[in-house]
Image (tube, grey):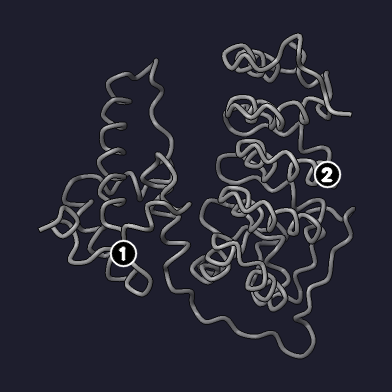
Amino acid sequence: MSMANAIVPETLRHGNYDSWSAWMKNYLLAQDLWDLIESPSGTEPPNQEVAKEEYKAWRKKNATALHAIQICCWPYMNFKTELSTDSAKIAWDNLANSYRKPLPLPVPKGNAGKFQIPDSDSDFDEFDDTDSDFDTDNGTGKVKDDYTQFAGLADSVYRGDWHSTMNFLDRHPGVINSKINSFGRTVLHMATITGNVEIGEKLVKLMSKGALAIQDVDGNTALHYAACRGAAKMARHIVEKNDTLVTIANKRQYIPIASACASGYRDATIYLLSVTPLEVLSLDNGIHGSLLLRHAITSKMLGKNCTTPR
């Protein structure tokens, strides 16, 4: 008997997610690991310096849960984006977005389905979602409906299938400017996280200026994720449409340039350095500058041979 069969009757593959997730949940519950998946803060470890023992306990539980999830997937899945993470919660949520069957969606009536490129100067609270089949939360960009309705869209983005992605957005135009999962992320967030740069660049052209500023539950905009992925070209497209994003900090107080530098991506860091106002990095404006300096020193990234792009 394989290790996977000791946990679930059969490994995850296309078509059996509902059964697999129920088996997997029961196992994680029995091993006292389900709280990592269920908790909104499951991706955030305790502070290692302040709570060393709690951090060690969290790290062990996270590794155990992630290992169980990985070995219970069909072998080829371990090379896919869904499992390319060191977080059990992120792996679980990625698999749910990719393999959970979406609920049936109504087709818009009449000619309301064709997607129109919004005015790039429109503000987030001026989004017009009247042609969308989904109720939005008073212009906040958060879709009220069950997020499982967007599993098909997420799957298309993860697979890099632009035709299917655009087909969904044509039928439901209000979705592109809305948060579509429980992490408060837009379809552009998902494209950047999964590294689908080509789809991401196309989405930037279709989204409004305000929608690009949407922050997820961790405070990250799509630009943060482009920076973390080293996607300098995508970052440039985003900034050219909304240059204020370079000053937005996430909950860890990282602005995009700090995220790029911390992740070790030189090209993205150098580009963002050229478009980030110097006053944002000054001591009078918080810790943004010191965070960047710390990561620049540890990565040996910025020095006498560093030049900004023209």
Task: Say whether residue 277 is left or right of residue 9.
Answer: right
Identified at 75% across, 43% down, the residue is 233
Indicate whether 28 appears above or below 270.
below
Q: Amino acid at mark 2?
A: Asn
Q: Position of residue 122 (x, y in %)?
A: 87, 56
203 vs 128: above or below: above
* Total count of labels: 2
Residue 9, position as x, y percentages in the image: 17, 66
Compute the Cα span from label 1 to label 2.
Answer: 40 Å
Instruction: State the image quarter where residue 133 is shown.
Output: bottom right
In the figure, is residue 13 to the left or right of 157?
Answer: left
For mark 2, what is the residue? 242
Cβ–Cβ below 8 Å for labels 1 and 2? no
Q: Quadrant of residue 163?
A: bottom right
- The answer to whether 201 appears left or right of 134 in the picture is right
Image quadrant containing the C terminus: top right
Nearer to the camera, 189 or 38: 189
Quadrant location of residue 75? bottom left
Q: Nearer the viewer, residue 17 or 280?
A: 17
Left or right, 159 with respect to 117, comes to: left
Query: In what quadrant of the picture does the N terminus appear?
Result: bottom left
Q: Secondary structure at mark 2?
A: loop
Q: Which residue is mark 1?
A: 12
Position in image of residue 303 (x %, y %): 72, 11
Q: Amino acid at mark 1?
A: Leu
Q: Residues within 10 Å of mark 1 (few under 14, many from 20)?
A: many
> Which of the numbered marks, if any, corresponds to residue 275?
none
Q: Is residue 15 above or below residue 106?
A: above
Front of the two marks 1 and 2: 1
Q: Determine whether the residue tagged by mark 1 lies in a helix, strand or loop.
A: loop
